[in-house]
Image (cartoon, grey):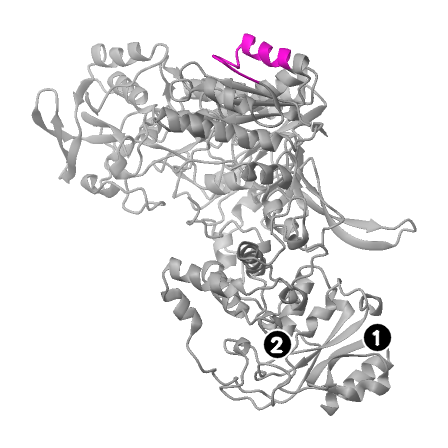
Amino acid sequence: MQALQELARKLLTDKTANVVIGWGQGPRGPRPIFVTQPEHADRLIFDTRCVHNLATYLNPRRAHLVPFVKKAVVVKPCDARAVAGLIRETQVKREDVVLIGMRCGGVVRDSDMDGKLTEATVSPRCMDCPDREPKLADHLMGEEASAPPKGKGPDMIAKLDAMSPAERWEFWQKELERCVRCHACREVCPMCFCDRCIADKSMPQWIESSPHPRGNLSWQMTRVMHMAGRCVGCGECTRACPVDIPLGLILRKMTQTVEERFGYRVSDDPTVPAPMGAYRLDDKQEFIL
Amino acid sequence: MSRIGVFVCHCGENIGRTVDCAAVAQACGELPGVVHSIDYKYMCSDPGQALVKQAVAEHKLDGVVVAACSPHMHEKTFRKTVANAGINRFLCEMANVREHCSWIHEDREEATQKAIDLTRFIVEKIKHNVPLEPIKIPVTRRALVIGGGIAGIQAALDIADGGCEVVLVEKEPSIGGHMSQLSETFPTLDCSQCILTPRMVEVYQHPRIKLMAYAEVDKVEGYIGNFTVTVRQKARGVNASLCNGCGECQKVCPNKKIASEFDAGLGKRPAIYVPFPQAVPNIPVIDRANCALYKGRARNAKKDACKKCEEVCGRKAIDFDQQDTFLTEKVGAIVVATGYQLYNIKKEQDKEAISGYGEYGYGTIPDVIDGLQFERLASASGPTGGKILRPSDGKEPKTVVFLQCIGSRDPAKGIDYCSKICCMYIAKHTMLYHHKVHGGQAIVFFMDIRAGGKGYDEFTRRAIEENDALYVRGRVSKMYRDGDVIKVLGFDTLSGEPMHIDADMVVLATAMRPQPGIESLAQKLSVSYDRFGFINEAHPKLRPVETNTAGVYVAGACQAPRDIPDAVAMASATASKILGLFSASELEREPLVAQVDQGTCAGCFHCVRVCPYGAVEHFEVKDRKGNLIKTVAQVNKGVCQGCGTCQANCPSKSVELQGFTDQQIFAAINAF
């Protein structure tokens, strides 16, 4: 923790960065903070409750942060994948961002929990995360981390795969019925950076905006399609959802499908294009009739 | 409010038989925005088009929907008609009630309802159509011809004689192609080289032809009128500007035991060689796989093994260190004339779908040769000096069996099509054999004799009637070597008798296949090909030498099995097409291209990465003071082919395809 604070102080003092985006203590556990003064660097903390994906603040849509230009951001491995995604899709210039990488052995489900990492408290996002340290980072901190505890409960993907299409349809209909279209999933997602989301397009309006089952389904399916090969698996959408829709589940399934079909897994290497935005002659095409 | 006219075509009986066209016209007449709706027997005919024109003027139409055949067929026709009537041609759309309806349905009532639905979708779509203006693009009046066989040579000469520059790329060391290997040509029996070599020289000396032999097309970018082609000039190991073709190097080369490609493996050549004496250009190539020096270098030998060719070369033209070079050529049109290869009967085939002939010993019997090898035996310039001598022991064969349709017309072997030239060249072979080996007997096993063409049937009759060729209708089921002879077991299906022949030599008329590597070339050119690898023409009857990519044309045996007259005719046809294209300095293109909404584009550049044509560029949006606000995508209208991949891929739906905008498609879908 001290090393992190010292580094932040140094970066702000020598103007390598004009803001350090990290976590600080809030009234209900850690929360994102923006440190602009070297003397405030000691407010930075990092532990298993630092669940937020701070890469979302690099998104050029966050107009209040754009003037800082040079930004340092504290990242876990999943957050680093998001930064790589933003670089890959030309939203962030690598030279404008200093990545303070934290070794990570998993986080708890939410920041207001006790930080103890157990089978019961580990966030589902950490269960298939293969990365213990962000390779893209400029500075790497924290102790060597061991793999996060395996979470309890049934393997939902296997359960969904076992269902008939009709059952699966019913399952998702029921889950998505609750959606209130608050778009928190979109706002929190580091990879949702469009100036005008397709959900806001009105000429023509592809996705109905009021919260009823048909529009909800179009919205979430469109979002999942847009995330194919881009979702970094940070699980922030699931955490942000006020009505507990298992958004991470459908995204994990999509990630699995992309890996099977295109041999692609989202990494923190920004030079490898995602299959959604790549044209390859050897792309599989046997499903085209 | 729109003023739309609907015109329902009967297409004679084609649509009218299954669709009640009058009912469609009546139903569409009641749609909101439709002010005029009629049906007519042949809308594309002169009076039909006159009806459209008249209605545009009379009813002040601002949209015309023609419910008829596929837009592929007549969209251009009707767009021209409305343009002549004074409204923008992109305010005319077609509803396909033929291919999508009448041809595929039987129930008249349901088909009529579907035709009404299809027309209604287009009526809703056209309400969102906007006038569009054609795009004008410049044309580079220079052509690229890929392949220097007879088709490529003819195309190059015709284009160059028409006044435009040509780049001719040939992958072999010399142009000439397969025709240069032939002895005589059917149906006139004139000597192949005698008619070909003057053409080769003409190419070489033509002021407007740039010949690049021993070169291959590496990369193709751009679009009709504006291609940029990268050609890889393979290293000959000989400096072409110094060499005068004296041939001394070939004489001193110690390795003279290499099977000659030109002699179809029957003759030998040295490691430094020109394929044949009349080669154009007459500059040797070092075969690096067989040259002792390169083999030594590959093994990291300390000293070069042999430099005899360099020592003897008076012009100091040998350059062992020569590397492949890449040249960029700007051209406006491309002719693909890569020709063919022969199917082989061996066990190992380059494609899984194709299998060899176990019943003929998978090519292990030495005196079983293919048609091209027989050509070399019969040729005066061949390894035997024109004497028919069999490869195994050099004896004159007294009985020669010719087998037609080897591979061809045999789905079990993986090739369904007829190779077209074999009937004729086998007839020619029997004649040449009869002329050269007195008392010899030629026996031909055939499935059918296909001799359609001027003087062709007369030619095969002559082989049978005047040259004593014995034609047996049937197939050979087995062939094996028995001492000095080849036992040929066949069946005469006309007499119903089995045939057992002791042959001295067997000639197989193996199938014609496209050249290896044609698929990768086709992909570079974005042209489609069939499952055998033959390049697809744009239309089998009406656009036989065009491909599905504008500006790329096809000639000769890379499109389908072709004989020399066909290949030459096709080549001249491509030249005529290209000279037509080059006759104007600017080209008009349909404006159905993608357009980016720069206000909403987030600059993720998925579109740049997915565009198969490289048509999307970065564009910097600046304020009045020149400060960069953001970088967004922009489509180069000249390059865009309107495929819509970027439109489908754009996450924020900031790309629209003109003529197929979201608004238009949405309206059509919502009309359902």
Amino acid at dot 2? Pro
Looking at the rendering, the stretch of residues picked out in magenta corresponds to B37-55
Q: Quadrant of the N terminus of chain B?
A: top right
Classify mark 1: residues with Cα within 10 Å, few (<14), some (14-19) or many (20+).
Answer: many
- Who is closer to the viewer here, B301 or A279? A279
Numbered circle sitting on residue A77: 2
What is the chain letter for disc 1?
A
Whichever of callouts 2 and 1 sits on the residue coming sooner in the sequence is: 1
Classify mark 2: residues with Cα within 10 Å, few (<14), some (14-19) or many (20+).
Answer: many
From the image, tell me which residue sits under label 1. Answer: A18
What is the chain letter for disc 2?
A
Q: Measuring 66% from the left and 67% from the top, which residue is drawn there?
A: A190
Place residue B303 in its image quadrant: bottom right
Percent coordinates x, y for residue B585 in the rendering: 72, 23
The stretch drawn in magenta includes residue B411: no
Percent coordinates x, y for residue A94 in the rendering: 73, 67
- Who is closer to the viewer here, B393 or B600? B600
